[in-house]
Image: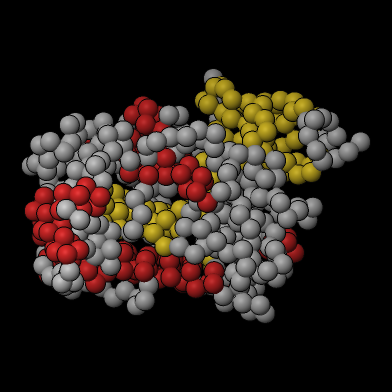
Amino acid sequence: MKRRQFLRRAIPATAVFPSLVNGFTIKAFGATGFFEALAGAADNDHVLVLVQLTGGNDGLNTLVPVSNYSDYNNLRTNIAIPFDKILKLDNYQKAGLHPAMTGMQQLYNNEKLSILYSVGYPSPNQSHFRSTDIWLTGADSDQYLSTGWAGRFLSDTYANFPVGYPNAKMPDPLGIQIGSVLSTGFMGPGGFTAMAVPTDADFYNLINGTLDPAPDTPMGNELTYLRTVARQTNKYADVIVSAAKKVGTQGSYPADNELAAQLKTVARLVAGGLKTKVYMVSTGSFDTHGGQVQVGNTVSGLHSTLLKGVSDAIAAFCADLQSLGVSKRVIGMTFSEFGRRIKSNGSAGTDHGTAQPVFVFGDYVKSGVLGNPPDLPSTLTSDDNLPMQYDFRSVYSSILRDWFCVEPTDITTTLYKNYQYLPFLKTTACTIGADELNTLGTNLIINYPNPFVNSTTINFKTMGGHTLVQIFDPTGRLVAVPVDRDYDGAGAYSVTFDGHTLSSGVYYARLQNGSVQQVRAMLKVRQ
């Protein structure tokens, strides 16, 4: 093979810098308006770490209902976590964590963890690939976007990248992904750039300037040449190596933990002074159709091992950031492409579902739980799913607003809609907190009659401003939007919902008003 042919096949035409150096896959994403559109964001030192849990994490066994435990236990008897094994959360009695998550329990009790119930999107798609794409791009379920939610910010700021970059204002990569698969989330209209270092050991080889020996073959000679080109042409390799070399001893991380190894690298680069704004790490195998628990011992099994790995890795990462003196620069969030079904299956597992809990961690989170344990009627079937309480794009929007200081109008432009604001970070000027949101009232939305045959009257309260009432079926599909309007002031209102064409079963009415949401279960019956 000719050298030119080898390089043409080895390096994508769209990549400005070679994608393979050696070691962990580190993708350095270029230039976009994610940060300078933030006004102060490009100048502040805030960092966001995205932790992807691939496969679809079972939320009900992660954040276990306590207030309605008997309903939960009846619906998944063969996999339910025993009541006395649920990890308690300080000053919160409605739910607790899986017993393997002691690290994240400690973060919560130390006021460094915020939990959001039932995060998803209307009319969810239960395909791994499609739902992952929706979460990464910020699309609606029937919308296909070629750019990512972060990449769209990135494209508006550093014009003509990579020409003139790196420079004094932004000498470092804007985003870094550690892993082997390029994330659509960082794709901007102008594309992206990446450098790849596939293994933990080879990342440190990169830092130390060593490489695995190339074979003494013609292909080995080409590989040696490609490595040389990569080192010479990748403008960010030197700044990454320089940052990593500035850090000596790091904190203790759990061994044989892939996620911990990735987060250790992130901590090293943040502490080394990189101005990189967004990092992404990932861990997998959450597709627990079978063997989710060990039969006869539901606190053990695959899901327990996975949750322990995530919890221990994040706890070690936060402790390391603290010891390195950079913890106030970083927040992180977990996400998966979807949750799992409410009812367990006969294989000691759970099938593809919809909404999931999201965990946000760091020094500047408002420790608490947003939302409430879902209603779990005994009439639910194996096809039914958790109703969405929060749209995942509201999480993105709130992080952009309160962590990166993006103007609300710019957020709407980038995410294409005005999403609900959620106050889970301390940096917000809004004074309302998670506890206040959850106690604003237990009857903000009710309906009568319930059960109903053909129609029912939905009564709801609003504080004024934009108010939304949505109706979801048990699978999570959006079937109606009875209210979507602005109100001049606070008050109580009603609307008639005509459900005569719907099949019998459980439906959910969801109220959204400002930072407030509440979900009401409704039962449609035959006459």
- Display colour scheme: secondary structure
Quadrant where the C terminus sits is top right
Judge left or right: residue 423 versus residue 509.
left
Please, is residue 159 above or below residue 41 in the view?
above
Judge left or right: residue 388 versus residue 114.
right
Q: Measured from the top left, where is residue 464 in percent x and y?
A: 54, 26
Q: Residue furthest front?
A: 1
Q: Measured from the top left, where is residue 313 in percent x and y?
A: 37, 68
Q: Number of labelled discs? A: 0
Q: Residue furthest bottom?
A: 296
- In the image, 328 versus 6, the foreground residue is 6
Please, is residue 182 above or below residue 305 in the view?
above
Q: Residue at x 82, y 30 (%)?
A: 500
Asked whether residue 440 is in view, the answer is no
- In the image, 456 versus 444, the foreground residue is 456
The quarter of the picture where residue 180 lies is bottom left
Q: Measured from the top left, where is residue 493 in percent x and y?
A: 67, 26
Q: Measured from the top left, where is residue 376 in percent x and y?
A: 71, 54
Asked whether residue 4 is in view, the answer is yes
The quarter of the picture where residue 42 lies is top left
Q: Residue at x 39, y 36 (%)?
A: 146
- In the image, 105 versus 118, the foreground residue is 118
Judge left or right: residue 216 versus residue 432.
left
Quadrant where the N terminus sits is bottom left
Q: Residue at x 23, y 57 (%)?
A: 20
Q: Residue at x 47, y 58 (%)?
A: 54
